[in-house]
Amino acid sequence: MRPVRVLLTGSTGFVGRAVLGALLREGGADGGGVEVRAVVRGVPAGAGASAGVEWVRADLSDPASLDGVASGADVLVHLACRVDGDAEECERTNVGGTRAIVAEARRAGVGRVVHLSTAAVYGPGPHRGIAVDGVTPAPVSAASRTRLAAERIALDAGGVVLRPGLVLGAGDRWVVPALGELLRRVPTRWDGGRGRVSAVDVEDLARLVTAVALAPDHEVPSGVFHASHPVPVRNRDLMARLAELDVLPSVAGDLPWDQCLARLREAPGHISERQFALLARDHWYESEEIWRLTGCAPGPGPLERLVGAAGWYRGWLGEG
């Protein structure tokens, strides 16, 4: 049997690097089980000739540059996205880029599309254990609005859309750094640390994306799936684990939510009140189904996985 040929975007990003690694491990030492064609604007330094990887230069914002990139591919795994920037930049990458790469995949007869989105499309919450679209998506940022629009492009192509919550692990430059800033501004336990969030370790998410990409056709139908670990994480447990690993300082005391917000307003910083609520209050989503459909074990959970990323976090936060 010939190898499964995967067309991958976003391979140099936080999640993309982990997914590329998971795909290559699935392919074996000689890359014989899976071949990856990674679409990049520039080949990463030191990438060289990796077994099972073909690096192709193209730009999602330039549809002409994508001509032929999907030829011979079986699966499109589309991870590339813009998570910040103004509305025009997000529209160009998240909507225009998705439309261009999906159109190219369809022209080439690619049989499966796997598209990574985000649970942030649901908006500010709080959300407590909701099923897929158990509340109407109401994104508030340009990035989330355009990522929701990109979902429709993938779904119209018969794709599988994955919505993870907070993604943790080596390479995370948003979640734990944001928690660190918030602790400096509001150095106490936030509303008792009661808030629960959907989270997933990046390596576990990569295993899941790979399982969806390589699953037999009948196992995973087209549609939207939550893609966090099935067990939500309580804020106080997350903060305690990060303190135990010497990533963030431990805290004492407790303030009710309204006083937390008042303290945040008094201390300037980059993280907004909306982002504070996303990290500290209930935002969790039923996530069991996709793990069950793929037969992919979700693992022990993001709190247990943090030990493997603690050194990276300490280095990144120390440099910051």
Image: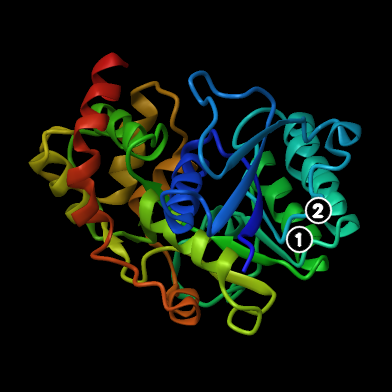
Q: Is residue 129 visible?
A: yes
Q: Which image quarter holds the N terminus?
A: bottom right
Residue 63 locus on image (x, y percent) = 88, 36
Question: The residue under label 2 is which amino acid type?
Answer: Val
Residue 252 or residue 45, whichever sits in front: 45
Q: CA distance from mark 2 to mark 1?
A: 7 Å
Residue at which label 2 appears: 102
Residue 7 locus on image (x, y percent) = 68, 49
Give the number of callouts: 2
Q: Quadrant of residue 243?
A: top left
- Residue 160 lies left or right of residue 201; in this view the side is right
Instruction: Assess disc 2: are there few (<14), some (14-19) or many (≥20) residues with their C-alpha within 10 Å of its C-alpha.
Output: many
Q: Secondary structure at mark 1?
A: helix
Q: Quadrant of residue 149?
A: bottom right
Residue at which label 1 appears: 154
Residue at point 52% right, 77% down?
131
Residue at point 31% right, 28% down?
181
Question: The residue under label 1 is which amino acid type?
Answer: Ala
Q: Secondary structure at mark 2?
A: helix
Residue at point 84% right, 38% down?
66
Q: Are marks 2 and 1 in contact (CB under 8 Å)?
A: yes
Residue at point 69% right, 26% down?
41
Instruction: Assess disc 1: are there few (<14), some (14-19) or many (≥20) residues with their C-alpha within 10 Å of its C-alpha.
Output: many
Residue 7 or residue 160, whichever sits in front: 7
Q: Is residue 251 visible?
A: no
Residue at far top of view: 319
Q: Which image quarter holds the C terminus?
A: top left
Residue 182 marker: none
